[in-house]
Image: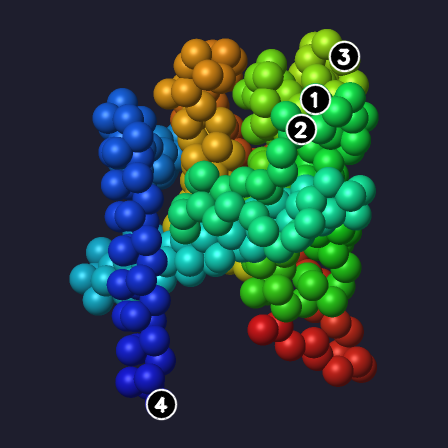
Amino acid sequence: MNWLHTAARLIAIAAGMFLLFAIAMEFLETSLVLFSVLLLYLVYCGYILPEIDRRREEHPGAKAASPGAENGDPGSRFSRLQGILTFLAITVISFLILHLLVLVMHEFSHSFCAYFLGWKPDPWNIIYGNWIGSRWDENVDYSALFAAGEGPTASAIAFAGPFSNIALFFVTAGLMSTKMVKNHRWAFHCTFWTCVITFVMVFEYVFTRSFLQHDDFGNINHGLGISPWPIFIVGTLLGILGLYYIFVYAVPEYHAIVTPHERPLQYVTVSAVSFVIFLFYIGLRITAYPDVPEWWCGAIGIAALFIVPFIASPARRWVQRSMKGCAVQEPPPSRPELSGS
């Protein structure tokens, strides 16, 4: 069965690299500057950051965290590269699948809310965008709602999407704290990425689009007749707390459960999470000015893209301490051993 395992791994690598290339091409079509940032980021996370960490490593047990990292044997290096590419491919594929699922949930939350409130005849009639997640829409006629003086109803429909994301964030965060999910690493992997995706969908809306005259929060502000500043300030502060939770608690716990003792794979995780939050969502908004007036939020996202992986690198002592505290404890000998998946 080894040949089946090898074939499956090669197929996964090929699919993941193709999707990663397709994402890069989407960036190239959007902006040459952002495409250049993406290429620089790949070099930074793949070589520069690990090299910086290797040179400044002070923790005496760090080499044990990545067995064979200093082994110059070509076979060992090839096997390690194959493992990194496989994990990267799995991360890309699972992210895109989960991203579309969460996006569909978000749009149907709007659509079904409009249906139940009597402002849409068919809740399944939404606008389906592309595979990367752009140009999706709930297909609700907000202008008709505002013209009819139904501002609060429009606000409720507009809030239904973010509310479903907020609810899902707390559900997934709660699931990641349970032994059932912790003891099955691929269940933890999917729950973790769902948590990251559903969080950034709301945070990006609040941080970069609170001052729009349309979109979810623009429709909420318009419908309730309120200033966008309270939502922007409160939402941004809560979003910063969410970022703190993800990078200080969730990412180290992911390292400890999904990729323990695999430093290269841990670099892949923290780099991928930072890419999704700070470039795929927030940084991308820098190209939408003046439609998105908070263009400077995109600049902040691009700066954070390089700063956060350095601060939250798996080589940091605080990350390693957090990983030790998050590691799944071995059951006592008198009890049956739990098997991971």
Residue sitting nearer the eye, 248 or 232: 232
Name the spot of residue 321 as percent of width and height, x first.
63, 42
Name the spot of residue 70 as percent of width and height, x first.
30, 52
Residue sitting nearer the eye, 18 or 40: 18
User: Which three-letter amino acid code belongs to the residue tagged 1?
Assistant: Ala
Q: Is residue 66 visible?
A: no
Specify which label sits upstream in the sequence, 2 or 3.
2
Count the numbered circles shown: 4
User: Which three-letter amino acid code belongs to the residue tagged 2?
Assistant: Ala
Q: Which residue is mark 3?
A: 226
Tell me if residue 309 comes above or below residue 303 in the rendering: below
Q: Which residue is mark 1?
A: 147
- Eye-nearest disc, 4 or 1: 1
In the rendered image, the quadrant that contains the C terminus is: bottom right
Name the spot of residue 39 as percent of width and height, x first.
26, 34
Picture residue at 77% right of the left edge, 59% below the top: 178
How crowded is the residue under tag 4: few (<14 C-alpha within 10 Å), some, or many (20+)? few
Specify which label sits upstream in the sequence, 3 or 1.
1
Q: Disc 3 to disc 1, how far (Cα)?
A: 18 Å
User: Picture quarter containing residue 140?
Assistant: top right
Q: Where residue 250 is drawn, which disc sits there?
A: none
Q: Are marks 3 and 1 in contact (CB under 8 Å)?
A: no
In the image, is 74 to the left or to the right of 233? left
Q: Disc 2 to disc 4, how far (Cα)?
A: 61 Å
Q: Are marks 2 and 1 in contact (CB under 8 Å)?
A: yes
Picture residue at 30% right of the left edge, 39% below the top: 26
- Eye-nearest disc, 2 or 3: 2
Q: Which residue is mark 2?
A: 144
Q: Disc 4 to disc 3, how far (Cα)?
A: 63 Å
User: Picture quarter containing residue 262?
Assistant: bottom left
Q: Disc 4 to disc 1, how far (Cα)?
A: 65 Å
